[in-house]
Amino acid sequence: MVQITINKDKCVACGKCVGICPADIFCKGEKGEILLQKEEACIGCGHCVSVCPHDAITHSLFPADKQQSFSYDDYPAPESLMTLIKARRSNRAMTKKPIPEEMLKMIVEAAYLAPTATNSQNLEFTLITDIDKIRKVTSFTISTFYKIRKMLANKVVAPVTKLLMPKAFAMVPMLDRLKAEFEKGNDKVMRNATAMLIISSPKGDRFGAENANLSYQNASLMAESLGVAQFYTGFVLTATRLNKGALEKELGIKGTICAGMALGMPQFKYVKYPIRKDIDFTQI
Ligand SMILES: Cc1cc2nc3c(=O)[nH]c(=O)nc-3n(C[C@H](O)[C@H](O)[C@H](O)COP(=O)(O)O)c2cc1C
């Protein structure tokens, strides 16, 4: 169990910890002093330690030397952040040049630092930089889809699937092209990615998909700001759902793959971004 203490000499009872704690571990006593209650409910977010202006709280998960001071002045200006958000693209034109190790580390760190439900921090990150393994991911994806394609286009059932599943049926020519291109050495699934970040969560985790997708988005913005090309590997993800557990087994991943990102150095950079439709949102 976590251990939290309040240093009475330092505490000025400002109540910031009371207001910030999501688990209501801090409360005010009759004389306005700060008290602790049900510490076992702590989710380990560390907000109490970070918000205390007088270093009055000690927390076994957040020792003083693991606290980093920062200044809001160091944040990117909102306009800069908005430019990054607007200009971020899925860039599929990648060179064979490897991504510098420090950049990969920053991308994985950004992925890791995304919020998780109840602060579970239980995502598993698998960074693949072995090109043969990336090819295996494509191979797995294409062969999984091809099994479905064979079923859809089976002479006996085709008229029925065409009628009942027109969208799936319409994918048949695309899957044929994908397979033919791969056999010619053109990987249209992972493109020329030199790295892949797979984000997985423990089997059956209620928020696995949400956690993984937030993590992907953190990583994609970091990649963009580093000048690294990336895209979401949705095709691979769909294959993992059609053939449950198979890719995880092949790659030695314990949990369930919930998101993935192809990464590479860009062949070229964009010079514009599209101005999207005006936002039509509801405020109630
Ligand atoms: C859930 C999801 C799955 C995606 N799957 C793929 C994919 O398998 N391959 C690919 O090249 N792009 C994929 N993308 C990228 C989208 O096509 C892309 O985000 C969209 O066209 C908008 O372009 P932008 O990211 O440049 O703004 C996926 C995106 C999302 C959000």
Image (cartoon, rainbow, N blue to C red):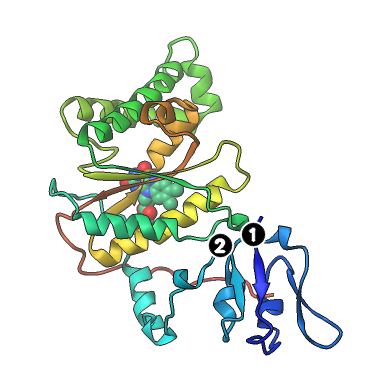
Which residue shows up at 36% across the image and 31% down it?
A: 251
Measuring from the top left, give residue 173's x and y in whole percent.
Answer: 33, 28
Q: Which of the numbered marks, if any, corresponds to residue 61?
A: 2
Residue 39 visible in the current orientation: yes
* Quarter where residue 47 is shown: bottom right
Q: Which of the numbered marks, if any, corresponds to residue 158?
A: none
Q: Quadrant of the N terminus?
A: bottom right
Residue 275 visible in the current orientation: no
Measuring from the top left, give residue 88's x and y in whole percent.
Answer: 32, 64
- Number of callouts: 2
> 123 above or below 117?
above
Residue farthest along the front direction in this orientation: 9
Q: Quadrant of the C terminus?
A: bottom right
Q: Which of the numbered marks, if any, corresponds to residue 2?
A: 1
Measuring from the top left, give residue 63's x and y in whole percent.
Answer: 51, 68
In this picture, residue 278 sits left or right of residue 230: right
Which residue shows up at 66% across the image and 86% down it?
A: 11
> 244 above or below 117?
above
Who is closer to the viewer here, 142 or 226? 226
Who is closer to the viewer here, 94 or 157? 94
Secondary structure category for the residue under label 1: loop
First-in-chain label (2 vs 1): 1
Tag 2 near tag 1, CB within 8 Å: yes
